[in-house]
């Protein structure tokens, strides 16, 4: 019975998120459709056409960002827990973010001791990408991103730290709230919500500390399992 309740809750979460994503993606699609119609119209000037095309690209990028932020949730496949190596996941996701880090002149430091945790690989990667991407975005004009693991008995803590813009107490308290963003049209406010949900699903804990103008640290505590 207990298992069934958990399953039902998960299904509800997935369908809620799927509905939310389709709503969020439909808006940009509608906007782009409108622009394309105006581009096609005889009377539209060349200057207007160029402007509409530029806006269309922006809207498509936005739809893409929304999908990227919780792609794994929108996927209807039932969640598969597996034994995963933490080090491999960290390196894979850092690789994906390398171009973005270069763009912002962000240096990456790692100090990782491998161990195994239990979870869904795609979800965990999504969570790491969402957090590290935020860190890099918080350091637009260079900075340092550090990733470290601390293992204690049956638990590992993954610490991700940036020396970027940081957050005020008020901002920090809203972190993870759906659609909470300070990035305007560039933001979705879905990345941290997904990250918190993923760590919760893995029976872990995600805590965040931040100081404005100094930086932010994310602590991901997870139970350690034996290598499969
Ligand atoms: P988005 O990145 O699309 O805005 P997120 O859910 O990923 O949405 O993050 C929500 C908000 O939390 C961001 O807009 C930003 O204000 C704040 N935030 C998250 N991570 C950091 C960080 N490392 N440093 C400073 N602010 C952050
Ligand atoms: Mg984000």
Image (cartoon, rainbow, N blue to C red):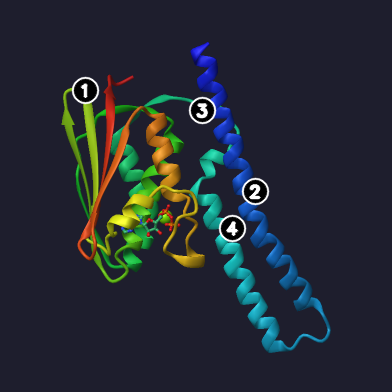
- Residue that extends furthest to the right in the rendered view of this protein: 42
C-alpha separation, residue under disc 4 versus residue under disc 3 = 24 Å
Labels 1, 2: front one: 2
Work out whether residue 224 or residue 10 is closer to the camera in this orientation and state it: 10
Residue 75, horizontal then vertical, whole percent: 58, 37
Residue neighbourhood size for the residue with mark 4, other residues' Cα within 10 Å, grouped as few (<14), some (14–19), many (≥20): many
What residue do we see at 41% from left, 63% from top?
182
Query: Could you tell which of marks 2 and 3 lies nearer the N-terminus?
Result: 2
Query: Could you tell which of marks 1 and 3 lies nearer the N-terminus?
Result: 3
Could you tell me which secondary element the residue under label 4 belongs to? helix
Q: Left or right? Give the position of 22 relative to 211.
A: right
Residue neighbourhood size for the residue with mark 2, other residues' Cα within 10 Å, grouped as few (<14), some (14–19), many (≥20): some
Query: Could you tell which of marks 1 and 2 lies nearer the N-terminus?
Result: 2
Could you tell me which secondary element the residue under label 1 belongs to? loop
| Image quadrant in which the C terminus is located | top left
Query: Could you tell which of marks 4 and 3 lies nearer the N-terminus?
Result: 4
Give the number of the disc on residue 22: 2
Circle 1 residue: 154
Labels 2, 3: front one: 2
Residue 16 lies in quadrant: top right
Q: Decide if ligand 1 comes within 8 Å of the CB at mark 1.
A: no
Residue neighbourhood size for the residue with mark 3, other residues' Cα within 10 Å, grouped as few (<14), some (14–19), many (≥20): some
Residue 57 lies in quadrant: bottom right
Task: Look at the numbered discs 4 and 3 and tell me whether their residues touch, using CB distance below 8 Å.
Answer: no
Circle 3 residue: 79
Judge whether 106 appears above or below 130 on screen: below
Give the number of the disc on residue 63: 4
Residue 29 lies in quadrant: bottom right
Q: Decide if ligand 1 comes within 8 Å of the CB at mark 4.
A: no
């Amino acid at each position: 019975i207990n298992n069934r309740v958990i399953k039902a809750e998960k299904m509800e979460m997935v369908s809620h998120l799927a509905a939310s994503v389709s709503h969020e993606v439909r808006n940009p699609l509608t906007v782009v459709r409108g622009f394309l119609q105006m581009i096609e119209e005889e009377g539209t000037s060349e200057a207007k056409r160029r402007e509409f095309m530029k806006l269309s690209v922006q809207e498509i990028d936005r739809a893409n960002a929304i999908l990227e932020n919780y792609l794994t949730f929108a996927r209807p496949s039932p969640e598969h827990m597996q034994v995963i190596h933490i080090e491999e996941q960290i390196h894979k996701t850092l690789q994906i973010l390398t171009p973005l880090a270069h763009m912002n002149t962000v240096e990456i430091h790692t100090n990782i001791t491998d161990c195994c945790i239990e979870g869904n690989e795609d979800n965990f990667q999504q969570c790491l990408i969402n957090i590290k991407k935020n860190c890099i975005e918080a350091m637009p004009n260079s900075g340092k991103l550090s990733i470290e693991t601390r293992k204690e008995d049956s638990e590992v803590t993954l610490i991700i730290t940036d020396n970027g813009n940081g957050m005020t107490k008020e901002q920090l308290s809203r972190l993870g709230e759906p659609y909470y963003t300070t990035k305007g049209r560039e933001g979705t406010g879905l990345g941290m919500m997904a990250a918190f949900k993923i760590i919760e699903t893995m029976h872990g804990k995600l805590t965040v500390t931040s100081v404005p103008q100094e930086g932010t640290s994310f602590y991901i505590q997870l139970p350690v399992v034996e290598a499969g």
